[in-house]
Amino acid sequence: MEYNSLGRTGLNVSRVGFGGGGIGQVWGATTRDEAVRAVHRALDLGINYFDVAPAYGDGKAEEALGIALEGRSEDVIIGTKVRVPADDLANTTANVQRSMETSLKLLKRDSVDILHVHNVFTEKRVETRNTLSADDVLGPVLDAYRAVQQAGKTRFIGLSAMDHHV
């Protein structure tokens, strides 16, 4: 497996990452055994970056990854996400912290390497479900993510979806 440095983070990630949609049953039923075998096979092939989200099977992907990594000693890099309720920005910090705590419990970890914003965001606010404006992301959302980072729950903050005009 080949690895690349991820920006200025110091993280060396496999060129091929493991997206958690399948183990989260996003595209259909997956047994726990199949999910664990898939993660173990990825590890055996040298994949060290795993990307999951609460939205992938209502937490099933995070739970399956947590189970699969139990007892394994490989250095893995885990990214998860929080989808911020666009209609509840006043409670962004509490919502992000609550989602993060649930994710960490399912992943059986004290922290993750990367916490992504899992909302589409656009230059200006639009009335679309879970769509944030750039000002939302650079204001209350970033503040909430930084609080999680300062609490030691994530090393880095990332974005996973944005309009191409931003």
Image: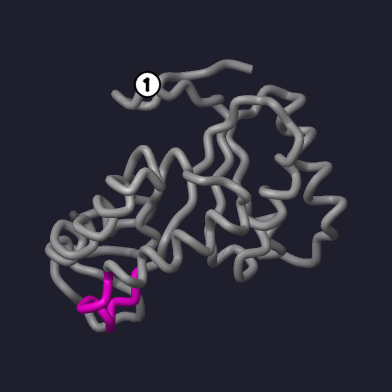
Q: Which residues are magenta?
A: 84-92
Query: Badge 1: few (under 14), some or many (20 or more) residues near its Cα, within 10 Å?
Result: few
Residue 86 is a magenta residue: yes
Q: Position of residue 97 (x, y in %)?
A: 37, 63
Q: Secondary structure at mark 1?
A: loop
Q: Amino acid at mark 1?
A: Gly
Q: Position of residue 42 (x, y in %)?
A: 72, 33
Is residue 98 shown left or right of residue 145? right
Residue 95 is a magenta residue: no
Give the residue drawn at x 85%, y 60%: 31
Which image quarter: residue 39? top right
Is residue 51 shown left or right of residue 126? right
Helix, strand or loop: magenta stretch:
helix
Q: Is residue 15 above or below residue 57?
A: above
Which residue does the numbered mark 1 point to in the structure image?
10
Give the residue drawn at x 73%, y 24%: 45
Q: 20 or 143: nearer the eye? A: 143
Is residue 58 shown left or right of residue 117? right
Q: Position of residue 166 (x, y in %)?
A: 18, 54
Give the residue drawn at x 41%, y 20%: 5
Q: 13 or 71: nearer the eye? A: 71
Q: Is residue 17 above or below residue 94?
A: above
Give the residue drawn at x 49%, y 51%: 80
Q: Position of residue 125 (x, y in %)?
A: 17, 74
